[in-house]
Amino acid sequence: MINDKGFITIVALLTMAIILISALFLIYTSNMEYLIVISSQNNIQAYYLAESKIHMVLGKEEYYYGQLVPRIETYLKYGRLGKFYDRRIILDNKDLFEGDNNDIIKVGFAEENNRRILELETYSTYSGISKNVLAKTTMINDFFEMGIPIVSIEYILQDKIREFENYMLYLQEEIEIPKQSNGLIGIEAMDYDNIKFIRRLDNRIDIEFFRNDIEDPIKREMLVDNEIFLLARNNYVNPTLSIESEKDSDKLILKGIFYIEGDLKIYSDFEFYGILVLNNGQLLMEPSSEVKIEGVLLLNRYNGNLLDSGNIQINYNLDEIRKYGVYLPKFIDPKVQVIKSY
């Protein structure tokens, strides 16, 4: 009987020990799972905080226009930031989450799949956990990096047509002569019926402005440089821009941006380097004239086929596009391709 009592005691102690060990194991496992969940939540929160900084730089005017766009413009024009800007965008402390003291967004540039890529890199800390994030975005509006010399609804994919039409409408509403253009001469030909660029016998280039079918020009200007930003439109009729030369063998060479809401008529040999936009107009050439465009040609509501003419050569040239495109609205148009942690 005594031995039975001792045996029962031992079994009871062993059972209690097993229950205690099991309970401790369950508590330990629960604590570990809790810590893992908390750690995972903190990790995710740190990632979202870092990601929000990227979106803040891309979406908040003081960072986008004040710090990011000037860096992109400088890189596109010169191929480097040089002494103009460093590779850091600094956030205001008021835009940082409590406990996260990293106010720096690193800016980098690369080229992938024939696209210019902007890289934005930062990290955030939440409850002691830090997360590094890298975002890659395209920099230039898709229509200028398609690699095709003529951009119009006839030459782009079907699913891009509406976007292109919207961009041309945006361009029509927002385009203006840039206030700062680094030597690019602004010519605002508003409400004229005809604008003529004429190369004289002495090689100077004159611009004549006509209105109301008057034979003599309303005004004249002499072009002192061949890099120009031309804005030609009329609220009442489609204007005509003419390219002429007093001597048939002389070639007129111009560079920059031509935005014309009307027709372009070419009566002499002509070379253009940059971005030519014909919005609701035609390009007409004398059969004897030879025309060369280096850059890109944007056509909207254009009837006809330029490539049927054997005396025009249009070459896609990204260097010329980048050089002058920074002066066009929404030429710089970052689109996020990927955001990843590392």
Image (spheres, rainbow, N blue to C red):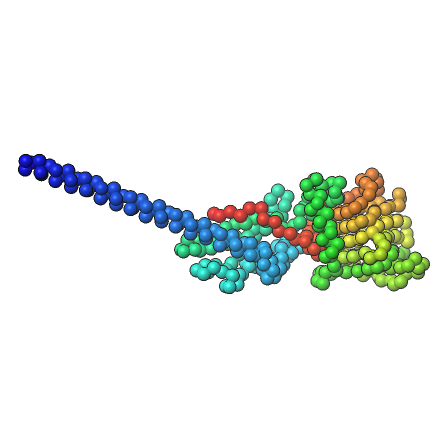
Q: Which quadrant does the N terminus fall into?
A: top left
Q: Residue at x 85, y 54 (%)?
A: 237
Along the line of sight, the residue nearer the viewer: 69 or 303? 303
Q: Which quarter of the figure has residue 82?
A: bottom right
- The mark tally for this picture is 0
Residue pushed farthest left? Answer: 2
Residue pushed farthest front? Answer: 1
Figure check: 59 above or below 20:
below
For residue 99, side relative to residue 142 (left or right): left
Residue 148: percent from left, percent from top: 72, 42
Viewer can see residue 106: no
Residue 265: percent from left, percent from top: 86, 49
For residue 258, side relative to residue 318 (left or right): right
Q: Residue at x 62, y 42 (%)?
A: 113
Along the line of sight, the residue nearer the viewer: 273 or 25? 25
Figure check: 230 above or below 34:
below
Q: Which quarter of the figure has residue 13?
A: top left
Viewer can see residue 97: yes
Q: Residue at x 69, y 46 (%)?
A: 163
Q: Residue at x 11, y 36 (%)?
A: 7
Along the line of sight, the residue nearer the viewer: 305 or 243? 305
Residue 182: percent from left, percent from top: 71, 61
Q: Which quarter of the figure has residue 24?
A: top left
